[in-house]
Structure formats: structure tokens, C-alpha cells
Amino acid sequence: TFADATYLLDMDGQIVHRWHYPDLRVFYARLLPNGNLLALGNHPDVMPTITPAEGRVLPINQRARTMGGNGSQLVEFNWESERVWSYNNERIHHDFVRLTNGNTIMPEWVEMPEDADRLVQGGLREARSKRPKLVSDDYIEIDPTGKEVKRVHLWELLDPRRDPICVLEDRNEWTHTNSIDLNVTDNTLLFSCRDNSRVGIIDWTDGSLQWKYGAPEIFHQHHASWLSNGNVQIFDNGMHRHGNPYSRVVEVDPKDSIIAWQYVAKPQQQFFSGHISGAERLPNGNVLVCEGTAGRVFEITQQGEVVWEWINPFVTIRQGEPRTWLFRAHRYGADDPALAGRELDAGNYRALNRMHELMRGPRSR
């Protein structure tokens, strides 16, 4: 997270391609079908966290820079790390969906109207005069020129009493969206909100809420994604879970909100990432799990057997501390259109591989 490079690795953990950007610190990036990389991040000059003077309320654009997952630029890079498209917005964050028509959907932080703010329950209590307005999310769609073509207010869809902020969280944000995913079959947008532990489905055509799921089944979850069978996969972080915290990956059927499958470690506390993290269903039915705060990526079967594992060797400095955190990880097959005709040779990055001691590869099982 917030690095000056994105790496494509082979199954032995060796670098086979690198995108490098000296003028951007990337929070999250992923490949597009054309082989370009779409990346969310900030210019290095806006990276430092802003600390307001006591009693001073920051404008929303500056408040956004204090919140996790913030970005001010969404940039598309070609294979040679050259910018081919960009969009600037100081309030976008965490995730994005590129549509086949070239449009892009993103979450955007917004301050809630005062009358709606007053109704939201939960969170650590403090005098209203000492805190700014609650922040929630809008989901915006822009065309390739950056023009906004659609906006949905999430704070109008959730219930301020039935979807409260976790009682152990500050009353700074109501929702804190950390993932979005579009089902192109029926044009439904799946979203995940950390601060009130809610996952939901929005009909992107008319903006209505179709389904909602959350605590006490999941706690401060990340990376809700559509599966090919119509179910939803969620990385349940388990932060603030009752009793000992542990993480798990769950598959939920939105027709009845029943858990169809789950992965829990044995012992269960052995697998825990309090924030960030994700899980991706692979074509073979296995699941690629990103244990974000540990910097660990591993593949499990449907029976929960770990068959591949990789530990992040890349260290970034965030707020003066070295970290190997990973927001999310993706795997691309050799037949993926994004990699067609690309040279993927670890020998081209021999010096980098040696520097990071990657020549021996990850541990397979």
C-alpha cells in the first residue's frame, strides 16, 4: 500500500514485470483486460497525514487525507508505466470498477446532511460541538472524459438506526466503503462498508437497495466480490468480534443470507487480519487469500487445505514505520488477455529479485 511500484510476480514469487511511478504513491492497482494498469493513489506531496489544530474542523477534501484508503488520483498506465488516462478527485478512495464502455465507478467520501447525521446511531459518543459532520459515501460513475454521469447516495439507502456505527469506532464515518464490484449480468453493484459492518447490493440502473447483510454475522469486513454462481464472497476480518478475534472467508447466498461455505483456520485465532485484506475465487474453485496486515498471500482448497503461500518481501515506509501490508492481491492466469504477447521473464529483473531475495521462490505445499 502507498508504494512507488506495482509488481507482477510468477508462481515462484519472482518479479516478471514492474510498473514504476515516481510521481504517485499507489494504494491499490489492478490489471485491465488490455494489459494496462489502473491505479489509485496520491502524489507524494499530499501523502503526509493532516492533523488539524484542536477545535478546528477540516474541509471534507482535507479530512479525506486523514482517512484510510484515501486517494486523489485514479491513473491508467500502459505496460511501459506511461500515463494514458487520469482522473483527479480528492475524495475518491479504496476501489474502482472499469466498465466495458470505458466508464468508471468509484466510492467518494461526502459529508452527510445535518438532519441525516443526527439520526445515525452508534460510535463512541462525544459532544456534537466537538466533532464535524459524519462522512458517508456516494458511488459515482464518470465517463472517459471525467464527466459525472451517475451518482448514488449510500446514506439514503441504509437505515441510520438498524445499520449503526460499531460502538468501538469514532463517530467520524458512518460507512467507510472499502470495496465495490459490479455484476454485469444484471447491473447490480456489490459494496462493503467497514465502519458499520455492512455488505449490500444496489441495482445500478435505478439506484435501489436490493439486499443487505452484516453484523453480527460479519465484523469490519473487506473485499466483497461476486462469484459466478451469484453468491457473494467476503473477507470477514473479525475485528471487534465478540470473544477472541479471528478472520475468515465466507460465501453467502444473497437469496437467503445463508453461509454456503467458509474458511476458518485451525486454531481459528491463527488467522487474523484486523483491517485491509481480501479473497479472490480462482477458476479451479480454490481461493486466493490476502492476509493484509501480515503481508501474506495463500491459496486454499474448498476443504481448507493451504496449497500455496507467499510472504511479502517489499517494505514501504508509512508514517515513519516500515510495513509489508497488502490491501489486496490478484492472480492472473497465463491465458489472461491482459498478458497476451507480454514478455514475462524474471531474468529481466534479476537485480531486483536478488535484492529482495526472491530467487528461491515461495513455499509450496
Image: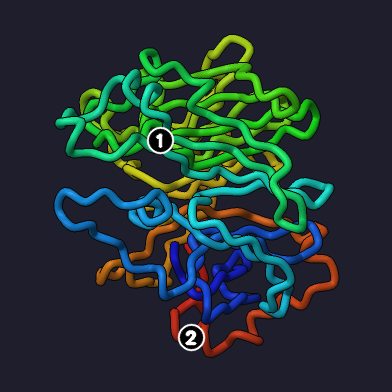
Q: Residue at x 62, y 68 (%)?
A: 8
* 118 sits left or right of 13 in the view: left
Report the coloring of the rendering: rainbow
What is the spatial separation of the Cα atoms under label 2 and label 1, in whole angstroms?
38 Å
- Residue 222 % position (x, y): 46, 39
Q: Residue 57 got which mark?
A: none
**Residue density around tag 1, few if under 14, some if 14–19, many if 20 or more, within 10 Å:** many
Q: Quadrant of the N terminus?
A: bottom left
Q: As shown in the figure, which amino acid type bears the numbered disc 2?
A: Arg
| Amino acid type of the residue tagged 1 in the rendering | Arg
Is residue 208 visible in the rendered image? The answer is yes
Q: Residue at x 53, y 29 (%)?
A: 154
The location of residue 213, given as percent across then percent down, is 49, 19
Query: Looking at the image, which residue is at 45% across and 33% down?
Result: 193
Relative placement, left or right, of 341 versus 359 is right
Along the viewing direction, whichever of 131 and 362 lies nearer the viewer: 131
Across and down, in percent, residue 269 comes to 28, 37
- Residue 300 appears in view: no
Residue at the spot of label 1: 194
Q: Secondary structure at mark 1?
A: loop
Which mark is drawn over residue 354? 2
